[in-house]
Structures are given as structure tokens and as C-alpha cells.
Image: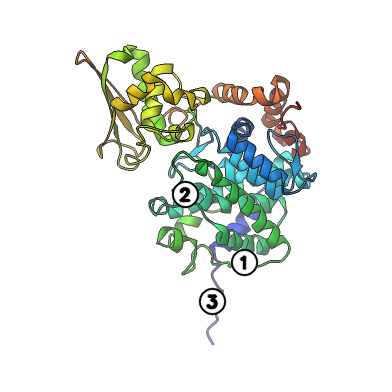
Amino acid sequence: MQKKKPAQRTLARQLAEHHGRLSWNDVPEAGRQAMKRLLLDYLGVAIAGSQTESGVIARTYAGLQGKGPEATLIGGRARVPVAAASFANAISCHSIELDDIDVLALFHFSPPVFSPALAVAESVGANGKALIAALAAGCEVMERVSTAANNDLRNRAFHTTPTCGVFGATVAAGKLMKLTADQMTSAFGLAGAQASGLMEMYGPSMQKRFNPGPAARNGVVAASMARLGFTGADTIFEGERGFLHAFAGRDEAATLVRGLGRPYALEIEFKPYSCARPIHNAIDCALEIRRAHAPALARIRSIVVRRHPDWSEYHRNPAPRTYHEAQVSLPYSVAIALLEGNALLDQYTDRKLANAAVRRLMGLTRIETDPKLPRGVSCHTTITMASGEAYVSQVDFPKGSVQNPMSDDELSAKFESLSVPVVGRTRAARIADTVAAIEKCPDVGQLMRLTMGRAG
């Protein structure tokens, strides 16, 4: 009689078993440092984002979900249920267009993964080593799912950050809740049932800021329900009606678990400018021309920006109505960079949209598609003067990319500029010191309480 072959483990089961047992000791030193850099960046961005209109609304909503000692609302004065804190903090982190970036799909790791991980860690009294392991596991799972689904997922109008981020949120929260492999497998199924997020988010509204909030919250819900015994579909990734078929129209099962068990190198990029990442190359071009040639802005005749087909049809708005629209407008970003020499929070305000010089430069900007450019985000800019003289710049790797990274000092300066106005210089320094030695932190709650806004 022929022996029956054991059933093949599903993708969710393989991920649950591997990432469930991942510990601080399993995370390579490079991975630990990457998580520390990203944690500092996340906290600075979320602290500043918590003070924006969308951040304030999200914090107000979270406060209405009930008071409690579970988790801190970053930039506020309240502690609320874990799911509510995860939701609001994710929105805060995504509210100023300065959160991190991945290389393939240009999604954001930290809003959907770090928000629930920190909230759960605070609620259970986890230490810094457990936090880093959870963050590393969450980021890896999120990137694996994205790699298996993109670019088809994005081209079908789904937003990668929330759709793939809910799985990263789930594993990060589940690890800190100490789920078993069976529970984590079910949690992945429950996460898939909640995966959502559309690219119909550009415009004058706050829609884009909202997207990572449900993913962060839903990861907590999935892990919490699984811990209570609620079972989920273990074929959520590769099933006939599972995530990959539904969101990408294909089955890339092998991609999802390729190299599982080997050290995983995350490629994380950081933003120096307060706008959508594919616009950064154009800003770098504008700033390079500004530094090298100091063109008289009133004498500019035309600005031609050539972009790769991957992103050429995005960010074309020539007349944004609000700063939300401006942050996803290439013509505005190029114009303000030429005018003020930067593209940070101060450059994206409703007041500056009415500036006559900005409006003139936006009107002179034309975007063309160039398939010969080497990378999806590559940008070639030509500024032609009234005299006929032309200034040219091409940027393939924007500032903050893996190939053109922000230094530790630059990241620290970014953190300080974002956090000090909200929490004060003393507490900002304590946050930075705690993150730098997070493995020595006995209780993540100590770190989170430093992120509360000042009274008064």
C-alpha cells in the first residue's frame, strides 16, 4: 500500500511558523540597525503628523473609542484601546508625506506595521528586543506580499500600503501577543478578509492619509480574534479566491516564500521632501539646477520634465487646490523647490498655492513620457530660459534612496525638526537616546509616553 504524502503546508502556515519564532537573536545586525533608523523616523513623522488637521481628527476619533491605559496616542495627551491607537497613529504618520519608502512598489512600511506593533508592545509591557523582532517580521512579511503581488496589484488600482500592510501589521501584533503557529495562520486569514485600499485617493481631500489606518487597526483585530480562538482560512494567499488571485490576478506562491529562513535584507528608503516619493527625483533635478545655475525665475520660458512610463501619468496636477493636492503635484513641487530651495512641510501650505511666482512656474511645466529612462522613478528635467539657454539635470536615484542614502546625522536632523515643536527638545533627545539603545529598554511604554504632546 502506497504511503500517503503529507499535505503541503500553505503559504500562511509557512510564514506563521517562520516569523512566529523569529527573535532578536535571529535578526542580523544590519536588520536591527535598519529597524532602529526606521523607528526614529517613524516617531518623528508621526509626532509632527499628529498635529495636522487629519492627525487631530484621527486622534479625536480614537479618543471617542473609550479611554484606557492600553496605548498612547502619539502627539496627544490620551491613552486609548490598542486598535484605536494603531488606527490614529498610522494616520498621523501618513499625514505629512514624509514616511519611509520601499524600493519596488514605493509603499510605506511604518504606518501599518510600526503603529500596531508599538501599541501592542505598550499594552503587554514588551521590551525593546521583542519590539525589534516584531517590527522586522512585520516589514519582511509586508514586503514579501508586495513582491508577490506587484506591479499588477498597483496597476489594478489597489494601494499597496494598506492591502499588503495589513499582513505586516498582523504578524507584528501577533508576535507581541505571543500567538501560536496555528493562531498566527488563522490571523493571516482574518487579515486577508480585511485587506483593502484603493489608489483613488489623490485630490483635495484627506483620503490618502486615511488608508494605512484601517490596515494597522485590522492587523490588531486579526491577531486578537485569532488569540481568542477565531479561525481563519489558511489558504488566504494562494487559494483560488485568495489574496494573490483577487488583488494581482495571478499566483506567485513561490515568490512569497522564496528564501524563507535565510537572513532577509530589507531595502528601506527615507524621504527628505514632504511629498509623494516619485516626485522626489524631479525636486532633486530642480534643486541641482538651482544650485548650479541660479536661474532667474522670471526669465524661465519652459520646464520640461521627462518621466519613466511607470510613473509618468501620476502627479500631473498643474493647479492643486489644497496642500494635500500639492503634495502629490509634480508641477507644484518643482515650482516651490525652485522658488524656495526646499520641499519640506513649510513649503506645502494652502497659502503658498496662491503665490504668483509658484503659479507661473507650474503653468510653464510640461511632463513627457520617456521609456528610455533607466528606472521607474527616473527623471530628466530641462529648464529653458528666455535667452534660449537650457539647463539640464537627470536624477535616477533620489536623495534618501539606497544608492543615495540619508546619513544618520541627516535622519537625526529630520527627527529633531519634526518632533521638537511638539514634544520639546529635552523629550525629543530622550526619544532619540531610547531608540538608539532600544535593546536595553525594559518596557516599550516608557518610550511611547515620551511621544505625548505637551500639556497646554
Q: Which of labels 3 and 2 is toward the front?
A: 2
From the viewer's perspective, tell me whether residue 449 is left or right of residue 89: right
Outermost residue to the bottom: 1
From the viewer's perspective, tell me whether residue 192 is left or right of residue 427: left
Decide which of 90, 167 is in the foreground and name it: 90
Compared to 431, does 138 lie above or below? Answer: below
Q: Which of labels 3 and 1 is toward the front?
A: 1
Q: Secondary structure at mark 2?
A: loop
Amino acid of disc 1: Gly
Q: Secondary structure at mark 3?
A: loop
Write down the residue under mark 1: 232
Dot placed on the residue nearer the N-terminal end, 1 or 2: 2
Residue 326: x and y in percent read 44, 32
Residue 61: x and y in percent read 67, 45
Dot placed on the residue nearer the N-terminal end, 3 or 2: 3
Write down the residue under mark 2: 159
Classify 10 Å Cα crowding around label 1: few (below 14), some (14-19), many (20 and above): many
- Position of the N terminus, as image quadrant, is bottom right
Outermost residue to the left: 388
Amino acid of disc 2: His
Dot placed on the residue nearer the N-terminal end, 3 or 1: 3
From the viewer's perspective, tell me whether residue 254 is left or right of residue 30: left
Decide which of 372, 15 is in the foreground and name it: 372
Tell me the tag on residue 5. 3
Decide which of 299, 272 is in the foreground and name it: 299
Residue 59: x and y in percent read 67, 40
Q: Secondary structure at mark 1?
A: loop
User: Residue 342 falls in which quadrant of the image?
Assistant: top left
Classify 10 Å Cα crowding around label 2: few (below 14), some (14-19), many (20 and above): many
